Image (cartoon, helix red, strand yellow):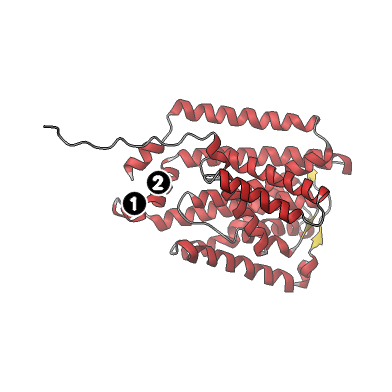
Amino acid sequence: MDDTVHRHAPGRAPARRQLAAGVAAILVLMGCAFVLPRWLLFVGTMAASHGVVTLGIVLMMRGGVVSFGQGLVFAAGGYAAALAGMYWGLSDALLLVAIGGIGAVVIAAPFAPLLSRYRGIFFAMLTLALSMVLYGILVKTTALGGSDGFNLSRPTFFGIGVEADQGNFAMYLLAVAVTGLLGLAARVYFDSTRGLVALAVRENELRVEYLGASVRRLLATDYIIAAFLGGVGGALTVLALGHVEPNFSYWTTSGEFVFLAILAGHHSVAAVFVAALLLELVRSFSALYFPNTWQLALGLFLLVVIRFLPMGIGSLWSRRPAARPASTGPTA
């Protein structure tokens, strides 16, 4: 485990440069809001919200497990934000996003100790089953709109109401700021001792246990963090769409997040959001120019990326750990 940590641990100076570059990227993206067309602002908002959900899957992938049920926390966050606006009269977008993240944690936390006991396909199928259970509950609950869901009123931003024309602009700025800061926090966590131990768990879980670290506690913590990220993404999506429905928890939604995680890889946080933006653009243009076969175009795009970038988009610029030199015995 120590060897794995040392091989992946960045120096302080590179880490500071990464954070500085991340802050600069957030500011540049926010500045782009003044020149981008309205439709692209909406696409960017959806890419940011879906990217932060996928970031939770990438977090778990670093520990050797993959969640096929991220739709559970995605829907939980969306419904938590929507219900807070409906029944509590809350309208501030940032507050609703925070409520979405907390609501997802409340839903997911009781299952974390159970899920941390399983690995591989068992972990994936259990998370998928939990997501589909929530889907069934939402579909059958008429108080939550049943299978149709329900609409939300337009949110305010720091107490200021915005017109419909400015809604996409304000939501884009909020989504970029929130997801960008969470992305920087994830980068710090990945480079921390606990984050690097997750890579050791991925390579040799038994050795990590022998060295005194609790793998189950680590995976449970990562699952709860991923739940918060998923809830924030769900709340942002609901606020951008103005509508919430049970399909947020359906297996196809969870599968899309897994595809995004595969496209991005687990090497780079920025790659997660780049993959999300590329997928949204491909989906938009495919639906526009190939309305009857856009799913085929989307599938071909995924196959091409997976074929030529098996380690994900992040492998294009992420530094791979150097291979250890082979040990040589004494020479005669």
Contact between labelled residues 1 and 2, with CB atoms less than 8 Å apart: yes
In this orientation, does residue 97 appear?
Answer: yes
Indicate whether 41 appears above or below 139: above
Q: CA distance from mark 2 to mark 1?
A: 8 Å
Q: Is residue 86 left or right of residue 98?
A: right
Mark 1 = which residue? 208
x, y percent for residue 289: 82, 48
Indicate whether 221 appears above or below 188: below
Mark 2 vs mark 1: which is more N-terminal? 2
Indicate whether 152 appears above or below 47: below
Q: Residues within 10 Å of mark 2 (few under 14, many from 20)?
A: many
Q: Is residue 135 left or right of residue 226?
A: right
| Residue 197 numbered mark, or none | 2
In this orientation, does residue 160 appear?
Answer: no
x, y percent for residue 237: 73, 51
x, y percent for residue 143: 77, 70
